[in-house]
Every structure is written in C-alpha cells, then in structure tokens.
Image (cartoon, helix red, strand yellow):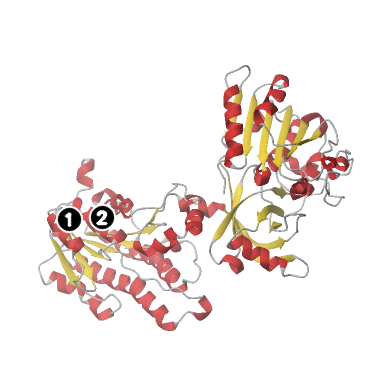
Amino acid sequence: MADVMSLFSLSGKTAIVTGGTRGIGQAMAFALAEAGADIILVQRDTTNTSTKDEIINRLGRKAWIHVAELGDRQAVKGIIPALTSQGLKPEILVNCAGIQRRHPAEKFPDEDWDEVLEVNLSSVFILCREFAAYLLARGASEFPQGHRGSIINVGSLLCFQGGITVPAYAASKGGIGQLTKALSNDWVAKGINVNAIAPGYIATDMNTALINDADRNAGIMARIPAGRWGNPEDFKGAVVYLASRASSYVSGEVLTVDGGWMGRRPVSIVNTLFTELGFTPISGLDCLYIVQFHLPKLVHIEPGCHVFAYIPRISWWMSHPFSIAWAEPSTSSAATFLPAPTQSPPTQGKGYTDLEKQSNLPAKPSKPSTQVSLIVGAQKGMTRRLYNLANASPSKTLTLGGFIEGPYGSHPTNPSSYGTTVLFSAGAGITHHLLQTRELVTAAAQNTAATRKVYLIWSVRSTDHLTWVSSFMDQILRLPNRRDILVVKLFISKPRRAADIVSPSATVLMHSGRCRPDVVLDEILPGRTGATLVSVCGPGAFADEVRSAARERIGKGAVVDFAEEAFTW
C-alpha cells in the first residue's frame, strides 16, 4: 500500500496550465511545481514571465511558455501537437483561463457572447479533447498503474446558480460543470480522470472593485461561513489532490472551494416568492417602513434569525441583511395563539393601555403561506432607493418580485431551558426579541418549556418609536396567560411630554430616562425562578452595558448566562 505522501507526489509529471500568470491559475501552477511537476504555461504572449521565472528560480522545476490565443480555435487545436513535437509528455491539464463581460441580458452583444463562450467553454472542450486523444494514443506500457492523466477544469459558483448581467459567463461556467461530467463518463474507465474546481469569492485582481466597495464587501462577507474572502493559495491543496494519485477514484466531480458558501446556500434559499413591499410612514420617523415577504408555503422561522433580501428591481443581484421582526403563521406552537388584529396601531402613550385588555378572540386560522415582516430604515443604497420608490406611489405600497435567503441564526443557547429570561433591546434591536418573546410566552403557557418568567426590556428615544412594532406587540399581549409570564419594561430616554409616560399595568411598565441594565437586573434577579438567561440586541454602547452588568452577576447565586446577538448589521 502506498504511503500518503507518495499519493500526492507529482514527481516526474508535466502539467499544462492556462491562465497561470496571476491569481488562482498562478497559485495552481506553483502548487503543482511544489508537488514535483514541471509546468507548461499557455499564455497569449510572453510579456509576463513572473510565473515561469519563480517556478525555475525558487522551486527548481522546469517551466516553459507556449503562446496561444484561446479565442482562436486553430491555435487551441495546435497546442498539444506543438508541445509533443518538442518531446514534452504532459499528463496533467489545468484549464483556468477565462474572461468576463457584463451587460443587461436584453442588451448583451452577440460579439461578447461569442467571445466569452469561445474562451471559457469551447477552448476548454477542444483542449480537453486533444489532450485526451494524445493520452489515449500513448501505449499502455507507459502507464503501468492504469492511470493515464488528470484534467482539472476551473468553473465557478455559477456552475450551480445563475448570475445577473453575466448570461454568457453563467452559460460558460454552467457548461464547464456539465462538460466535466460528460468527459468523465467517456474517459475515466480509460484512465483519465476529469474533475472541476468551483471557486467562491476570491481576493484576486478581478474582484478588486468589489472588495473596495464597503457595502457590497460587507454583504458578501456576512454570507461566507468561513468569515473571509478566499485567497489563491486556498486552491493549492485542491489542485494537487485532483492532479495526483490521491484522487484516482474521484472523477466527474465539481469541487467547491468557497469557504462553505454552497454548503448552506442551496438549502437556505427559502423559495422564489412574490414580494409585497408595504410602506408605512412612522410618526416622527418617516424614513422607516415595513417590508413584508409573502412566501408561497409554510416555513418555520426560528426566533432570533435574519435574512438576506434580494429585490432585483432595486439592487440587481445584490442583497441586504435584515433581522426578522415577525413571521406568521409558523409551524411553531406559537402559531395557534395568534388572533387577528382588531385595532389600529397605538399612538403616543395610550396604545398599550388598550392592549392590556386580555382578549378572548378565537385563534387566527392557519394559512398555506408564511408572511415575514422586516422593519427597514432608509439609509443609503438599496434601502433608500426602495423607500423613495414606495414613497412615490400614491398608495405608499409596492408589490415587487424578489427572493429571500435564510433564515440564518447562531442560536448559541436554548432560551426555553431557563426559568427566567431577560431580553434587553435598544432601538431597532427589538426586532431580534419579538419572536423570541412570542415563542417563550406560548411555550410557558402550554408547559412545554422551563420558562416561568420573561422580561422584555426595550429602550427607545421617543414614544413615537413604540409604533414600530405595535401590531406585533398587539398579538403578544393577547397571548393566553401572558400577564402571568411576561413583564414589559419600556424606557423612553427623551420623551416629548411627561404625560406620555404612562404605565398601563403592573406588567407593562413605562419609564422616563435611559435604561440602566444593572438597576434592571438588581430588580429582577432577587425574584427569579431557576437559571436566568440575559440576552441583548442593540447599539454597541448599550450592549456593552448589558454585558458588563450580566458578567458582574455571573457566579453569584443561581446560574446567570449571557447571550449576545451576533448579527449587528
């Protein structure tokens, strides 16, 4: 049995690499040379010799440059004969060269389509065909172990998903995925393995503009499980594996090197859905509005999650992350106890008094769909464009097509396992805790959780801000046995009038002034039941105060755990 290191050795092999002058292709060429192979670089000219020079001078391997224009079929057909006529015997082929052209699909020029398909797909097929024909023409005695060679094509995440404004590139990379499988079916039994590598978001020259765009960069980073952009060096191990005997029983595969992107993305696109964007001006803050996604089927939304919204009419292929403020109906137990709203949103200082009246209305019937609500502030970019478009509508409501990706959430703890839960929110951070509150109160009422007491602490500047979530709080305050389980404390840091600060009852309390987490915990903890979970979602300074107050009380008496929401976009 061969040892592991020998399985990955490419000593005595010669590899052809296209697109090897920079980025991923250059890293692959270096990796193959480091594993022992000599390298033939197929380039459009000889002005760039940096890869060749480093392979020779630093790695001590042989390297050649063969000049060929990959957009010229005759030139591509001549590559293998030209190399073999020099006595070279390549056994590895890496097709990494590619080009990109962007235009709206309805305006995409024929010449750009032809050029992209020629370089990215046709040249790959021709080179694979000529390379395989050469290998199969060699005598079997030259390959005592039966393995004649390896072909590695470089695809893209667009092997699996569509792009926007890149129909030719998407078609070519989708073609690479299928071509790889088709060629493998023909040749693997004859000793030629054919595989592909699909890169994710990689920090190369091609993506410099995207990396330098702070908003787009942050949006991409938030969706990469590895938490970083890839580097060309990340492909070294993959290409050596697929080029060596270590992968002798692997063929027809498209290996993603993407930091986990595709590992979660296929299951996280909830569905293609019709998106209704409802715009509701908020008193004093008319740059806030509610966006509602109507999913075509029932989807269970866990509390404390966020989603990425894709609205092509507003932002093309880019997305924006938002916390989920509310979702209904849900497959969770809470869905059974959601009565239909019967009141309009409360106004300054009075609405929560009405909401204190416990309702005996029948439960809201389940629907064969799910409505996901987001609270959106018009800042810049996508959110501002959406606001302006909705605000220009006479009805202040838009209905657009779109997508929702998610839901995502870290869920570091199980709140229902604690006897007491204290949820601190500041400003828009309330969106993280609304569904959690609904879930805990419902589970406690049904005796399906350890929860006995839930404290929802919300700090805002003005009583006007209470209208952000009035319709959602309406439903929470109508849950069965809510008064025995839930205590709501509202802190108004800058009230307009003292008369606005009115506590409707002993379980819905309104205070003037900023929230002091240490004082709140000192009031709650002496009367707690069982272990206590303290959670926070809000601006950094507020979160720091809650974290400090919770840590000071950890290890003193009954268990106190602290959980901070990591999604802070």
Residue 29 place in picture, x, y as percent = 23, 58
Q: Is residue 208 visible?
A: yes
- 199 shown above or below 115: above
In the image, 457: left or right of 160?
A: right
Query: Of 109 and 178, which appears nearest the observer?
Result: 109
- Residue 269: quarter of image: bottom right
The part of the image, by quadrant, that contains residue 190 is bottom left
Determine whether, in the image, residue 565 is placed left or right of residue 172: right
Callout 2 touching callout 1 (CB < 8 Å): yes
Q: Residue at x 41, y 67 (%)?
A: 173
Where is residue 460? Give x, y as percent. Answer: 71, 43
Is residue 82 depicted above or below 364 in this figure?
below
Asked where in the image residue 558 lies, by quadrant, the reply is top right
Vertical comparison of 114 with 11: above or below? below
Q: Which residue lies furthest to the front in this view?
A: 497
Which label number is shown at residue 360? none
> What residue would you read off at disc 2?
243
Q: Could you say which disc has been placed on residue 37 in the image?
A: 1
Relative horizontal placement of residue 381, taking residue 242 as reference (left or right): right
In the rendered image, residue 423, in percent from the top left (x then y), is placed at 67, 35
Extreme residue in the bottom direction: 110
Residue at image position (27%, 71%) is 127
Amino acid found under the numbered disc labelled 2: Ala
